[in-house]
Structure formats: structure tokens, C-alpha cells
Amino acid sequence: MKIVPVILCGGSGTRLWPLSRESYPKQFIPLVDERTLLQSTLTRLKGIADLQPPIIICGEEHRFIVAEQLRQIEVTPSAIVLEPMGRNTAPAIAVAAHKLLQHEDVLMLVLPSDHLIKDLPGFQRAVSQAATVAASEHLVTFGVVPTHAETGYGYIKATSKDIAQGVFTVKEFIEKPNLTTAKKFLRAGGYYWNSGMFMFRASHYLQELGKHHKKIVSQTSMALEQATEDLDFLRLDQRAFLDCPSDSIDYAVMEQTDAAALVPMSVGWSDLGSWAALYEVAEKDNHGNAVHGDVMLHDTHQSFIHASDRLVATIGLKNIVVVEAKDAVLVAEREQVQDVKKIVEKLNQAKRDEVKGHPRVPRPWGDYESIDEGVRYQVKRITVKPGASLSLQMHHHRAEHWIVVKGTAKVTREDEVFLLTENQSTYIPLGTKHRLENPGNVPLELIEVQSGSYLGEDDIVRYEDYYGRDKS
């Protein structure tokens, strides 16, 4: 039976602040190796029998990041579905099920986009094992064999009854326990970490969901029926989707159904839900330190040090996490990194940009990064992908200087059209209609110096845009 991966790409990953932000969450960041977590989620599927192109479910804000990261690894999805607002996992999966049933009933392999799995052959064997059971009227969840008493995960209690060889029926789902209870589970056996990964037939999922949450089924169906295509994206109808109840697949389906099955797996899994979790899976030096970037250590032990933009030097630390981003630095004891969420709450209350914005801002044509700013000026580093173009636009409150650092720029300035190469520059006066394009085969890199009374990103009047963005 055909298998369609459904990749859940929402979530803000705030427990990995300051690297993970609302506008650029952890699934889009290369935290473990050169690939982002989303890219690793997709590449580990290669080799699974009867695998079909994936469906990606994400928020509108992240659509161009998703499309670009899929292009980089040469994955063509069957759909990138845009949620107007997060409604948790049950509705997101229902949308994918409705979408698939427009053509045929298939097996859905539902995966979060931000997890780590080290044993790829073991994972693929578990998927093959689950496919056999899911094809025969079972809703399968993947239970991770626990390696220690963990309080950060939910648990699944399995029965000793085999549905098939090595596949068990589910007795109950259990919320995150305290340490005493987690130790009890570990001693008793038969308890597994809830991985948040599932497999079932599209029709069977909607059938079971409809027994208890008919409105989720009806509203997601309506949101899909009234969806509109936008470039390579499928934009769900906002009104219908916002009227859909918010619920997780665990609460809405898996804890309600009599058809739940569990496939155990021991594959080096982690949800990378905190800096402590990332420390556990990272390679370490002789003193138990995990480091990334430009780091210099002295008398430092069992610590996690991540440098993004600058040299980070440590002296006399033990069991400490240090994470340096361009605009923020986190320092915490390893055992207290779960409390990062409290810092994020305070940042939100103070309406600080560091909780949502990211120093590197992705755009459909490339990205930009602010490298300096002050009263009435801002300096940005801009990268434009080969063949890409910014919108034809104008600013009411700022003028711009462009200096080409690498590549070739095609500049439209009112009625003029001309090329700039490395070390050449031009000036765009306030109120002037203009466009920047990259006609070359290599990325275009330039420095933009803005000056004016207001430098906000909303000071843009768009006349033409290849990416379907609003004109103002």
C-alpha cells in the first residue's frame, strides 16, 4: 500500500531560544549536522518501500523557508498546505487525510519535522512493521524504548498482547510523569516514550476522529474545499479553519480509539526539546563538553557551548549551557534549561523583538540580515538567489544605497535599467520606484545602507511581485 509522509512543520521551538524564534523555529535550523531538522526528517525516508511525495503542513509565515529547504535537498512535495493559524495536530492531520482521499486511500506516515533519529535502518524497519498493521484497521503509534527515567516526555503503556509479531495493543497514554513515577515505569517495563509519530490509513483516521470530534472533520473538509492555490502553496480557507476546534491527535483520537497499536523502536530518538537534550546527543570532548562554532575553553567540564557569530571563551564552568546568537546570549545551568520558556514569557511581556524576530530574515528571493543600525540609518547584508527578483517597490520614508559585494545586480530605477558588478554601487532616492534582480548563476550579495525618518519593513509599496505578496 502506498505510504505518504505527512510532515507537521508548525511550532515555535521556544525552548531552544535564542537560536529558535517564532519567525525561524528549530525545524529550519541545522542543529545536529549540516542539514536542518526538516531536511533530515525527509532524507531519512529515502529507501522506504512504496513511498510517495510528502505533504507538508506549515504556517503561512514559514512557507518560503519550507519551499527553499525542500528545493535544496531536491524533494518535490505533493502539497505544501498553509494553516491560517495553528489548531494543533488533530486538525492538521485531518486536512492531510481529506487531501489524500481526493485521489485514493493511502497510508499516512505522520512525522514531526524537528526530531532526531540516529539509527536510520532501524527506523525504516519500524515503518515497514507499522505499515502492515496500519493497513489492517489499526492506528499505529511509535513508542520509543526508554533509556532512562525521563520526565520531559509523555509515556504509552502497552499490553503484552501481540497484534502481530512485536506489535502491541495500547492500554493507555500517560502525561509527563514526575521523576519517581518515571523510575517506576522504567523498572516495570512495557512503558514507552510517546514519539508523536503515527501511521494509519487516511480513511480510518477520519472515521475514528469523527466518532468524537465531528466538527474537526467537517471544518477541515470545508477549509480544504474552499482552499485557494497560491504559487506552489495550498492556502486553507481562513474562516472555516479558524472555526475548527483545536486539539491534539493524542486527545482527539489515540486516547479514544480501540484500534490503537504500538510499534516499539530503539533508534537513537530525541525530540531535541531543550538544550540539555541537544547536549545529550552531541559529540563531546575528553572533558564532557559539547561545542559548536568558534569556542575556546579553559577548565570547563560537562558543558554545552554554542557560538553562532563570535568567539565564545569560558573559564571554570561545569554543567553550564552557553548559547550565543547575534542579538542575544543565553547562560544557564544544564539542569535548569527547561526554564528558558520563562525567559521567553518575559520577552513576550516586554514585547521584545528577540523572541519573534531572527537576525537572518528569510524572503522568497533570498534573505537579509541587519548588521548595524542607529538614529535615521540601518545597514543590511542582502543575498538574492540566482534568477530571483525583489518586488517593484517604493518607500515613502527612506532612501537606499546599494554596494555589490559578490555577483551581478540588475537594477531598475524608475525608467532606468542597468547592471552593477562587484565593488560598484548605486543610490535609490526616497520615493523612487525600484527593483533589484539577480540575473546571474551565483548568489548576489550586497550591502544596503538605508537612511531616513522611518526604516520599518512596512514602509514598502509594491507595484509588482512574483511571490503573491500584498502590495502594501
Image: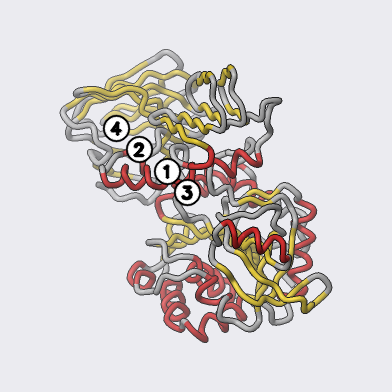
> Residue 407, how many percent across, how many down?
49, 22
Q: CA distance from mark 3 to mark 2?
A: 14 Å
CB-based contact (under 8 Å), mark 3 and mark 2: no
Of labels 4 and 2, earlier in sequence is 2
Of labels 4 and 1, earlier in sequence is 1
Task: From the image, tell me which residue sits under label 2.
Answer: 354
Task: From the image, tell me which residue sits under label 3.
Answer: 13
Q: CA distance from mark 4 to mark 1?
A: 31 Å
Q: CA distance from mark 2 to mark 1?
A: 8 Å
Q: Amino acid at mark 3?
A: Gly
Q: Amino acid at mark 4?
A: His
Task: From the image, tell me which residue sits under label 1.
Answer: 21
Name the mark nearer the viewer: 4 or 3.
3
Seen in the image, is 413 located left or right of residue 442? left
CB-based contact (under 8 Å), mark 4 and mark 3: no
Q: Is residue 353 above or below residue 313?
A: below
SS assignment at label 3: loop
CB-based contact (under 8 Å), mark 4 and mark 2: no
Please give the label number shown on residue 314. none
Q: Foreground: 208 or 74?
A: 208
Of labels 3 and 1, earlier in sequence is 3
Please give the label number shown on residue 434. 4
> Residue 136, how many percent across, how many down?
73, 81
